Image (cartoon, rainbow, N blue to C red):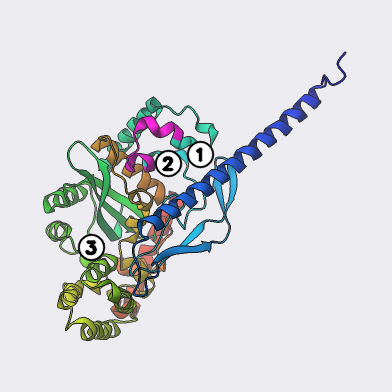
Amino acid sequence: MDENRITNDTELEKLANQTSHTLDELMQKAAQRMLTIALEAEVDDYIRRHQAERDETGRALVVRNGRGQERKIHSGAGILPITAPRVNDKRAGQKYSSSILPAYMRRTPRLEEAVPVLYLRGLSTGDFSEALTALLGESVTGFSATTVTRLISVWQQEYQVWQRRSLAEEEYIYWWADGVHFNIRLEQDKLACLVIIGVKANGSKEVIAIEDGYRESTESWLSLLRDLKARGVNSPKLAVADGALGFWKALGQVFPQAQEQRCWVHKIVNVLDKLPQRLQPKAKAQLHDIMRAENLTAALEEMARFERTFGEKYPKAVTCLTKEQEQLFTFMNFPARQWIHLRTTNVIESAFATVKARTRKTKGAGSRKAGLAMAFKLLTMSEKRWRKLNAAHLLPLVQAGIPFPDGQTKVLPELLPTITEISVKQNLMEVAA
Protein backbone atom coordinates (compact mmCIF):
# COMPACT_ATOMS: atom_id res chain seq x y z
CA MET A 1 0.00 0.00 0.00
CA ASP A 2 1.33 3.48 -0.90
CA GLU A 3 2.23 5.10 2.44
CA ASN A 4 1.92 8.61 0.88
CA ARG A 5 -1.71 7.96 -0.06
CA ILE A 6 -4.25 10.07 1.89
CA THR A 7 -7.31 8.12 3.00
CA ASN A 8 -8.72 10.33 5.74
CA ASP A 9 -11.50 12.73 4.63
CA THR A 10 -10.28 15.37 7.07
CA GLU A 11 -6.79 15.21 5.60
CA LEU A 12 -8.21 15.59 2.07
CA GLU A 13 -10.25 18.61 3.09
CA LYS A 14 -7.23 20.16 4.80
CA LEU A 15 -5.05 19.67 1.71
CA ALA A 16 -7.77 21.14 -0.54
CA ASN A 17 -7.98 24.24 1.63
CA GLN A 18 -4.21 24.68 1.57
CA THR A 19 -4.16 24.36 -2.22
CA SER A 20 -6.99 26.87 -2.52
CA HIS A 21 -5.14 29.38 -0.34
CA THR A 22 -1.98 28.91 -2.41
CA LEU A 23 -3.87 29.54 -5.68
CA ASP A 24 -5.58 32.62 -4.21
CA GLU A 25 -2.20 34.02 -3.17
CA LEU A 26 -0.77 33.37 -6.64
CA MET A 27 -3.75 35.11 -8.27
CA GLN A 28 -3.43 38.04 -5.88
CA LYS A 29 0.27 38.48 -6.62
CA ALA A 30 -0.33 38.18 -10.36
CA ALA A 31 -3.11 40.80 -10.23
CA GLN A 32 -0.90 43.12 -8.19
CA ARG A 33 1.95 42.74 -10.69
CA MET A 34 -0.34 43.31 -13.70
CA LEU A 35 -1.81 46.44 -12.15
CA THR A 36 1.64 47.79 -11.27
CA ILE A 37 2.88 47.18 -14.84
CA ALA A 38 -0.21 48.85 -16.29
CA LEU A 39 0.21 51.94 -14.06
CA GLU A 40 3.89 52.22 -15.02
CA ALA A 41 3.06 51.92 -18.73
CA GLU A 42 0.35 54.57 -18.40
CA VAL A 43 2.81 57.01 -16.80
CA ASP A 44 5.50 56.26 -19.40
CA ASP A 45 3.03 56.92 -22.20
CA TYR A 46 1.89 60.22 -20.62
CA ILE A 47 5.45 61.48 -20.19
CA ARG A 48 6.43 60.38 -23.70
CA ARG A 49 3.51 62.28 -25.26
CA HIS A 50 4.56 65.49 -23.51
CA GLN A 51 8.35 65.12 -23.53
CA ALA A 52 8.77 67.95 -26.08
CA GLU A 53 7.19 70.53 -23.77
CA ARG A 54 9.92 72.50 -21.98
CA ASP A 55 10.21 75.62 -19.83
CA GLU A 56 12.38 78.68 -20.55
CA THR A 57 15.51 76.87 -19.33
CA GLY A 58 14.87 73.79 -21.45
CA ARG A 59 13.77 71.55 -18.59
CA ALA A 60 10.94 69.09 -19.12
CA LEU A 61 7.56 70.26 -17.81
CA VAL A 62 6.24 66.72 -17.33
CA VAL A 63 8.43 64.38 -15.28
CA ARG A 64 8.15 61.48 -12.85
CA ASN A 65 7.80 62.33 -9.17
CA GLY A 66 8.52 59.15 -7.24
CA ARG A 67 5.70 57.03 -5.91
CA GLY A 68 2.62 57.73 -3.83
CA GLN A 69 1.73 56.21 -0.49
CA GLU A 70 0.63 52.60 -0.45
CA ARG A 71 -3.09 52.11 -1.13
CA LYS A 72 -5.05 48.94 -0.52
CA ILE A 73 -7.27 48.23 -3.52
CA HIS A 74 -10.14 45.79 -2.97
CA SER A 75 -10.51 43.65 -6.08
CA GLY A 76 -11.90 40.33 -7.23
CA ALA A 77 -8.44 38.84 -6.61
CA GLY A 78 -8.34 40.11 -3.03
CA ILE A 79 -6.78 43.15 -1.39
CA LEU A 80 -3.91 44.51 -3.51
CA PRO A 81 -1.31 46.80 -1.89
CA ILE A 82 -0.33 49.30 -4.59
CA THR A 83 2.16 52.18 -4.62
CA ALA A 84 1.27 54.05 -7.80
CA PRO A 85 3.86 56.15 -9.68
CA ARG A 86 3.39 59.92 -9.50
CA VAL A 87 3.82 62.57 -12.19
CA ASN A 88 4.82 66.21 -11.73
CA ASP A 89 3.00 68.09 -14.49
CA LYS A 90 4.19 71.71 -14.25
CA ARG A 91 2.11 72.95 -17.17
CA ALA A 92 -0.43 75.60 -16.21
CA GLY A 93 -3.87 74.21 -15.54
CA GLN A 94 -2.78 70.58 -16.08
CA LYS A 95 -2.71 67.70 -13.62
CA TYR A 96 -1.99 64.05 -14.23
CA SER A 97 -4.72 61.61 -13.24
CA SER A 98 -4.58 57.88 -13.85
CA SER A 99 -7.58 56.56 -15.76
CA ILE A 100 -6.70 53.02 -14.60
CA LEU A 101 -6.58 53.87 -10.90
CA PRO A 102 -8.09 57.30 -10.15
CA ALA A 103 -7.03 59.01 -6.94
CA TYR A 104 -10.37 58.35 -5.25
CA MET A 105 -10.68 54.66 -6.16
CA ARG A 106 -10.26 52.19 -3.31
CA ARG A 107 -12.01 49.19 -4.83
CA THR A 108 -12.52 47.92 -8.35
CA PRO A 109 -16.03 48.38 -9.74
CA ARG A 110 -18.60 45.71 -9.04
CA LEU A 111 -20.21 43.94 -11.95
CA GLU A 112 -23.27 46.20 -12.03
CA GLU A 113 -21.03 49.25 -12.32
CA ALA A 114 -18.30 47.74 -14.49
CA VAL A 115 -20.58 46.93 -17.42
CA PRO A 116 -21.92 50.52 -17.86
CA VAL A 117 -18.41 51.95 -17.52
CA LEU A 118 -16.97 49.61 -20.14
CA TYR A 119 -19.88 50.15 -22.55
CA LEU A 120 -19.77 53.93 -22.34
CA ARG A 121 -16.01 53.87 -22.78
CA GLY A 122 -16.52 52.21 -26.14
CA LEU A 123 -15.83 48.54 -25.47
CA SER A 124 -17.67 46.12 -27.72
CA THR A 125 -19.76 43.43 -26.04
CA GLY A 126 -17.44 40.74 -27.41
CA ASP A 127 -14.53 42.15 -25.38
CA PHE A 128 -16.37 42.26 -22.06
CA SER A 129 -15.37 38.81 -20.83
CA GLU A 130 -11.64 39.54 -20.79
CA ALA A 131 -12.10 43.04 -19.38
CA LEU A 132 -14.44 41.94 -16.58
CA THR A 133 -12.13 39.08 -15.65
CA ALA A 134 -9.28 41.57 -15.28
CA LEU A 135 -11.44 43.90 -13.21
CA LEU A 136 -13.36 41.48 -11.03
CA GLY A 137 -11.41 38.24 -10.99
CA GLU A 138 -11.95 34.75 -12.33
CA SER A 139 -15.45 34.56 -10.82
CA VAL A 140 -16.81 36.25 -13.95
CA THR A 141 -14.91 34.10 -16.44
CA GLY A 142 -17.21 33.10 -19.27
CA PHE A 143 -19.19 36.31 -19.13
CA SER A 144 -20.15 36.14 -22.79
CA ALA A 145 -21.34 38.78 -25.24
CA THR A 146 -24.79 37.17 -25.07
CA THR A 147 -24.85 37.62 -21.30
CA VAL A 148 -23.87 41.27 -21.64
CA THR A 149 -26.57 41.82 -24.25
CA ARG A 150 -29.22 40.28 -21.98
CA LEU A 151 -28.07 42.41 -19.05
CA ILE A 152 -28.23 45.57 -21.17
CA SER A 153 -31.75 44.60 -22.26
CA VAL A 154 -32.87 44.28 -18.63
CA TRP A 155 -31.42 47.66 -17.77
CA GLN A 156 -33.13 49.24 -20.78
CA GLN A 157 -36.44 47.97 -19.42
CA GLU A 158 -35.62 49.32 -15.95
CA TYR A 159 -34.78 52.68 -17.47
CA GLN A 160 -38.06 52.84 -19.40
CA VAL A 161 -40.08 52.13 -16.23
CA TRP A 162 -38.02 54.69 -14.30
CA GLN A 163 -38.68 57.31 -16.99
CA ARG A 164 -42.43 57.00 -16.53
CA ARG A 165 -42.53 57.03 -12.72
CA SER A 166 -44.72 59.59 -10.95
CA LEU A 167 -42.88 62.44 -9.23
CA ALA A 168 -45.93 64.08 -7.66
CA GLU A 169 -44.96 62.97 -4.14
CA GLU A 170 -41.44 64.36 -4.35
CA GLU A 171 -40.33 67.92 -3.69
CA TYR A 172 -36.90 69.12 -4.77
CA ILE A 173 -35.33 72.29 -3.39
CA TYR A 174 -32.16 72.46 -5.50
CA TRP A 175 -31.36 71.19 -8.99
CA TRP A 176 -28.10 70.54 -10.79
CA ALA A 177 -28.42 70.25 -14.56
CA ASP A 178 -25.85 69.44 -17.24
CA GLY A 179 -25.44 67.91 -20.66
CA VAL A 180 -22.97 65.01 -20.55
CA HIS A 181 -21.33 63.93 -23.81
CA PHE A 182 -19.72 60.54 -24.42
CA ASN A 183 -17.18 59.62 -27.08
CA ILE A 184 -19.02 56.44 -27.95
CA ARG A 185 -20.03 56.66 -31.61
CA LEU A 186 -23.70 55.86 -32.17
CA GLU A 187 -25.83 55.49 -35.27
CA GLN A 188 -25.52 59.22 -36.04
CA ASP A 189 -24.10 61.58 -33.42
CA LYS A 190 -22.31 61.13 -30.14
CA LEU A 191 -24.50 60.34 -27.15
CA ALA A 192 -25.55 63.47 -25.25
CA CYS A 193 -27.36 62.88 -21.98
CA LEU A 194 -29.40 65.64 -20.34
CA VAL A 195 -29.07 65.04 -16.61
CA ILE A 196 -30.88 66.63 -13.66
CA ILE A 197 -30.11 65.78 -10.03
CA GLY A 198 -32.23 67.18 -7.22
CA VAL A 199 -32.00 67.72 -3.46
CA LYS A 200 -34.94 66.59 -1.37
CA ALA A 201 -36.11 68.32 1.80
CA ASN A 202 -34.15 65.84 3.96
CA GLY A 203 -30.90 66.77 2.20
CA SER A 204 -30.50 63.60 0.14
CA LYS A 205 -29.57 63.82 -3.54
CA GLU A 206 -31.58 61.98 -6.16
CA VAL A 207 -31.44 61.55 -9.93
CA ILE A 208 -34.54 63.22 -11.38
CA ALA A 209 -33.99 62.81 -15.10
CA ILE A 210 -31.66 61.30 -17.71
CA GLU A 211 -32.74 61.90 -21.29
CA ASP A 212 -31.33 61.89 -24.79
CA GLY A 213 -30.65 65.48 -25.85
CA TYR A 214 -29.64 66.67 -29.29
CA ARG A 215 -26.69 69.02 -28.70
CA GLU A 216 -28.31 70.40 -25.53
CA SER A 217 -30.77 72.44 -27.59
CA THR A 218 -33.57 74.51 -26.07
CA GLU A 219 -36.10 72.14 -27.66
CA SER A 220 -34.48 69.12 -25.99
CA TRP A 221 -34.49 70.77 -22.56
CA LEU A 222 -38.05 72.03 -23.07
CA SER A 223 -39.26 68.54 -23.84
CA LEU A 224 -37.56 67.18 -20.73
CA LEU A 225 -38.78 69.91 -18.35
CA ARG A 226 -42.35 69.77 -19.65
CA ASP A 227 -42.38 66.01 -19.12
CA LEU A 228 -41.13 66.47 -15.53
CA LYS A 229 -43.80 69.07 -14.83
CA ALA A 230 -46.50 66.79 -16.24
CA ARG A 231 -45.34 64.06 -13.87
CA GLY A 232 -45.68 66.36 -10.87
CA VAL A 233 -42.24 67.91 -10.36
CA ASN A 234 -42.25 71.23 -8.48
CA SER A 235 -40.14 74.28 -9.33
CA PRO A 236 -36.81 74.24 -7.49
CA LYS A 237 -35.74 77.21 -5.40
CA LEU A 238 -32.37 77.23 -7.19
CA ALA A 239 -31.06 75.59 -10.37
CA VAL A 240 -27.32 75.21 -10.98
CA ALA A 241 -25.94 74.72 -14.50
CA ASP A 242 -23.28 76.03 -16.89
CA GLY A 243 -23.86 78.92 -19.26
CA ALA A 244 -25.51 76.82 -22.00
CA LEU A 245 -28.43 78.91 -23.20
CA GLY A 246 -30.63 75.93 -24.04
CA PHE A 247 -31.27 74.95 -20.44
CA TRP A 248 -31.84 78.46 -19.13
CA LYS A 249 -34.28 79.37 -21.92
CA ALA A 250 -36.25 76.21 -21.26
CA LEU A 251 -36.20 76.70 -17.49
CA GLY A 252 -37.52 80.25 -17.86
CA GLN A 253 -40.49 78.96 -19.84
CA VAL A 254 -41.40 75.95 -17.69
CA PHE A 255 -40.23 76.93 -14.18
CA PRO A 256 -39.83 80.74 -14.24
CA GLN A 257 -39.84 80.96 -10.41
CA ALA A 258 -36.50 79.12 -10.11
CA GLN A 259 -33.45 81.24 -9.31
CA GLU A 260 -30.39 80.74 -11.52
CA GLN A 261 -26.80 79.90 -10.54
CA ARG A 262 -24.02 79.52 -13.12
CA CYS A 263 -21.46 76.77 -12.53
CA TRP A 264 -18.16 78.25 -11.36
CA VAL A 265 -16.07 75.36 -12.66
CA HIS A 266 -17.31 75.92 -16.21
CA LYS A 267 -16.86 79.68 -15.81
CA ILE A 268 -13.26 79.36 -14.61
CA VAL A 269 -12.37 77.03 -17.50
CA ASN A 270 -13.85 79.48 -20.01
CA VAL A 271 -12.03 82.48 -18.51
CA LEU A 272 -8.66 80.71 -18.38
CA ASP A 273 -9.07 79.69 -22.00
CA LYS A 274 -8.78 83.39 -22.92
CA LEU A 275 -5.47 83.86 -21.11
CA PRO A 276 -1.93 82.70 -22.00
CA GLN A 277 -0.76 79.59 -20.13
CA ARG A 278 1.90 81.45 -18.16
CA LEU A 279 -0.77 83.62 -16.52
CA GLN A 280 -3.32 80.90 -15.89
CA PRO A 281 -2.09 79.79 -12.41
CA LYS A 282 -2.23 83.38 -11.12
CA ALA A 283 -5.62 83.99 -12.72
CA LYS A 284 -7.00 80.71 -11.40
CA ALA A 285 -6.01 81.63 -7.85
CA GLN A 286 -7.78 84.99 -8.16
CA LEU A 287 -10.88 83.35 -9.61
CA HIS A 288 -10.97 80.97 -6.66
CA ASP A 289 -10.72 83.96 -4.32
CA ILE A 290 -13.81 85.43 -5.99
CA MET A 291 -15.75 82.17 -5.84
CA ARG A 292 -14.83 81.48 -2.20
CA ALA A 293 -15.34 85.00 -0.86
CA GLU A 294 -17.16 85.12 2.47
CA ASN A 295 -19.81 87.56 1.23
CA LEU A 296 -20.96 89.41 -1.88
CA THR A 297 -19.06 92.61 -1.05
CA ALA A 298 -15.77 90.71 -0.75
CA ALA A 299 -16.52 88.78 -3.97
CA LEU A 300 -17.11 91.98 -5.93
CA GLU A 301 -13.89 93.47 -4.56
CA GLU A 302 -11.97 90.40 -5.72
CA MET A 303 -13.64 90.63 -9.11
CA ALA A 304 -12.57 94.28 -9.41
CA ARG A 305 -9.00 93.21 -8.56
CA PHE A 306 -9.14 90.63 -11.37
CA GLU A 307 -10.29 93.34 -13.79
CA ARG A 308 -7.42 95.63 -12.76
CA THR A 309 -4.90 92.80 -13.18
CA PHE A 310 -5.99 91.44 -16.56
CA GLY A 311 -8.44 93.94 -18.07
CA GLU A 312 -6.01 96.07 -20.07
CA LYS A 313 -4.25 93.28 -21.97
CA TYR A 314 -6.91 90.58 -21.87
CA PRO A 315 -10.33 92.23 -22.06
CA LYS A 316 -11.97 89.06 -23.42
CA ALA A 317 -11.14 87.20 -20.21
CA VAL A 318 -12.69 89.97 -18.11
CA THR A 319 -15.77 90.12 -20.35
CA CYS A 320 -16.19 86.36 -20.03
CA LEU A 321 -15.99 86.62 -16.23
CA THR A 322 -18.39 89.54 -15.81
CA LYS A 323 -20.96 88.17 -18.26
CA GLU A 324 -24.07 87.18 -16.29
CA GLN A 325 -22.32 88.41 -13.15
CA GLU A 326 -25.47 88.41 -11.04
CA GLN A 327 -26.06 84.70 -11.72
CA LEU A 328 -22.55 83.86 -10.51
CA PHE A 329 -23.43 84.90 -6.96
CA THR A 330 -27.02 83.71 -6.55
CA PHE A 331 -25.76 80.94 -4.25
CA MET A 332 -24.89 83.61 -1.68
CA ASN A 333 -28.62 84.05 -1.01
CA PHE A 334 -28.76 80.53 0.40
CA PRO A 335 -27.27 78.96 3.57
CA ALA A 336 -23.51 79.53 3.72
CA ARG A 337 -22.80 75.94 4.78
CA GLN A 338 -24.39 74.77 1.52
CA TRP A 339 -22.39 77.08 -0.77
CA ILE A 340 -19.82 74.37 -1.49
CA HIS A 341 -22.61 72.30 -3.08
CA LEU A 342 -24.32 75.16 -4.94
CA ARG A 343 -21.39 76.78 -6.76
CA THR A 344 -20.78 73.99 -9.28
CA THR A 345 -22.30 70.99 -11.06
CA ASN A 346 -19.55 68.70 -9.74
CA VAL A 347 -22.09 66.16 -8.48
CA ILE A 348 -22.85 65.30 -12.11
CA GLU A 349 -19.30 65.58 -13.45
CA SER A 350 -17.84 63.30 -10.77
CA ALA A 351 -20.41 60.56 -11.39
CA PHE A 352 -19.23 60.19 -15.01
CA ALA A 353 -15.51 60.82 -14.40
CA THR A 354 -14.47 57.19 -14.96
CA VAL A 355 -16.28 57.14 -18.31
CA LYS A 356 -15.16 60.48 -19.69
CA ALA A 357 -11.50 59.75 -18.87
CA ARG A 358 -11.07 57.70 -22.05
CA THR A 359 -9.29 59.22 -25.04
CA ARG A 360 -9.60 56.66 -27.80
CA LYS A 361 -12.69 56.62 -29.97
CA THR A 362 -14.71 53.45 -30.08
CA LYS A 363 -14.39 51.42 -33.28
CA GLY A 364 -17.92 50.10 -33.57
CA ALA A 365 -21.28 51.81 -33.44
CA GLY A 366 -23.21 51.52 -30.20
CA SER A 367 -26.91 51.73 -29.52
CA ARG A 368 -28.37 55.06 -28.38
CA LYS A 369 -31.01 53.33 -26.22
CA ALA A 370 -28.41 51.06 -24.65
CA GLY A 371 -26.10 54.03 -24.04
CA LEU A 372 -28.87 55.87 -22.18
CA ALA A 373 -29.60 52.77 -20.13
CA MET A 374 -25.92 52.48 -19.22
CA ALA A 375 -25.76 56.13 -18.19
CA PHE A 376 -28.89 55.58 -16.09
CA LYS A 377 -27.40 52.54 -14.37
CA LEU A 378 -24.07 54.22 -13.70
CA LEU A 379 -25.69 57.34 -12.26
CA THR A 380 -28.22 55.53 -10.10
CA MET A 381 -25.42 53.34 -8.70
CA SER A 382 -23.44 56.48 -7.86
CA GLU A 383 -26.56 57.87 -6.18
CA LYS A 384 -26.25 55.24 -3.45
CA ARG A 385 -22.91 56.72 -2.35
CA TRP A 386 -23.82 60.41 -2.40
CA ARG A 387 -23.77 62.11 0.96
CA LYS A 388 -26.43 64.51 2.15
CA LEU A 389 -26.12 68.26 1.81
CA ASN A 390 -24.39 70.17 4.59
CA ALA A 391 -26.77 71.76 7.11
CA ALA A 392 -29.73 69.77 5.79
CA HIS A 393 -31.80 71.02 8.75
CA LEU A 394 -31.88 74.45 7.08
CA LEU A 395 -33.61 73.16 3.95
CA PRO A 396 -37.14 73.59 5.40
CA LEU A 397 -36.28 77.27 5.83
CA VAL A 398 -35.20 77.51 2.21
CA GLN A 399 -38.30 75.62 1.17
CA ALA A 400 -40.45 78.10 3.14
CA GLY A 401 -38.87 81.00 1.26
CA ILE A 402 -36.72 82.37 4.10
CA PRO A 403 -33.93 84.55 2.61
CA PHE A 404 -30.26 83.99 3.49
CA PRO A 405 -28.42 87.20 2.44
CA ASP A 406 -24.68 86.46 2.46
CA GLY A 407 -25.56 82.97 3.71
CA GLN A 408 -27.12 84.09 7.00
CA THR A 409 -30.67 84.57 8.22
CA LYS A 410 -32.76 85.63 11.21
CA VAL A 411 -35.96 83.61 11.36
CA LEU A 412 -38.96 85.60 12.58
CA PRO A 413 -40.65 83.98 15.63
CA GLU A 414 -44.07 83.85 13.94
CA LEU A 415 -42.62 81.67 11.14
CA LEU A 416 -41.15 79.03 13.45
CA PRO A 417 -44.39 76.99 13.92
CA THR A 418 -44.85 76.71 10.15
CA ILE A 419 -41.26 75.65 9.57
CA THR A 420 -41.37 73.18 12.45
CA GLU A 421 -44.55 71.65 11.03
CA ILE A 422 -42.81 71.15 7.68
CA SER A 423 -39.83 69.43 9.35
CA VAL A 424 -42.06 67.14 11.43
CA LYS A 425 -44.04 66.03 8.38
CA GLN A 426 -40.86 65.23 6.50
CA ASN A 427 -39.44 63.24 9.40
CA LEU A 428 -42.67 61.23 9.69
CA MET A 429 -42.55 60.45 5.97
CA GLU A 430 -38.94 59.23 6.29
CA VAL A 431 -39.83 56.99 9.23
CA ALA A 432 -42.82 55.57 7.33
CA ALA A 433 -40.59 54.84 4.32
- Indicate yes or no whether the magenta region holds residue 49: no
How far across and how far down the image is residue 97, in percent? Answer: 41, 58
Residue at image location 28% in from the left, 83% down from the top:
302
Q: In the structure shown, which secondary structural element does the residue marked by tag 2 occupy?
A: helix
- Secondary structure mostly seen in magenta is helix
Q: Quadrant of residue 162?
A: top left
Tag 1: amino acid? Leu
Residue for badge 2: 114
Question: Is residue 261 visible from the viewing direction of this image?
Answer: yes
Residue at image location 39% in from the left, 32% down from the top:
127
Tag 2: amino acid? Ala
Tell which circle, 2 or 1, labels the residue nearer the N-terminal end. Answer: 2
- The reply to whether the C-beta atoms of the residues labelled 2 and 1 are less than 8 Å apart is yes
Q: In the structure shown, which secondary structural element does the residue marked by tag 3 occupy?
A: loop
Q: Quadrant of residue 350?
A: bottom left
Q: Is residue 331 left or right of residue 100?
A: left
Quadrant of image for the N terminus: top right
Q: In the structure shown, which secondary structural element does the residue marked by tag 1 occupy?
A: helix
- Indicate yes or no whether the magenta region holds residue 126: yes
Tell which circle, 2 or 3, labels the residue nearer the N-terminal end. Answer: 2
Q: Is residue 184 above or below residue 399?
A: above
Q: Is residue 351 above or below residue 287?
A: above
Mark 1 neighbour density, 10 Å: few (under 14) some (14–19) many (20 or more): many
Residue 242: image tag? 3
Tag 3: amino acid? Asp
Toward the viewer: 19 or 323? Answer: 19
